[in-house]
Amino acid sequence: MNEEMKWMVNMLVDEMGRIEERITRRFDGVDQRLDAMQHEISSCKLEGDSVGLLIKKIDQLESRMEELEGRTA
């Protein structure tokens, strides 16, 4: 291989290395955003479950109150 060919191959390899680094950085950013989104989704699901439990408990307490009011009336 002559010197010019070696130089071209080295330049191509270097450029491929730079492209790989850029892609890796970009994917790392996407992974971080995905992790944050998954955390938010989990929080929303937990909040929804908590609200559902609170509504159920309120309904139970209202039923008990109505029952007690019926006994005292």
Image (tube, rainbow, N blue to C red):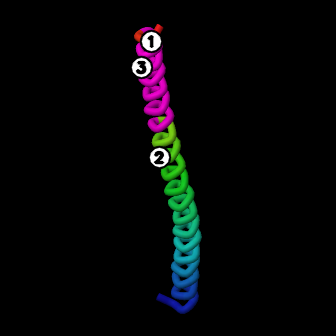
Is the residue marked by circle 1 packed among few (<14), some (14-19), or many (20+) residues within 10 Å? few
Sequence-wise, the earlier of marks 1 and 2 is 2
Q: How far across and how far down the image is residue 46, in percent?
A: 46, 42
Residue bearing the label numbered 1:
72
Q: Say above or below: 48 vs 17.
A: above
| In-front residue for pair 64/38 | 64
Circle number at residue 64: 3
At a point 44% along the width and 26% down the height, the residue shown is 56
User: For the residues marked 1 and 2, what is the alpha-carbon distance in whole angstroms?
Assistant: 45 Å
Check disc 1 and give the amino acid type: Thr
Q: Quadrant of residue 19?
A: bottom right
- Type of the residue with mark 2: Ser
**Disc nearer the start of the sequence (3/2):** 2
| Residue labelled with disc 2 | 42
Range of residues picked out in magenta: 49-70
Q: Amino acid at mark 3?
A: Arg
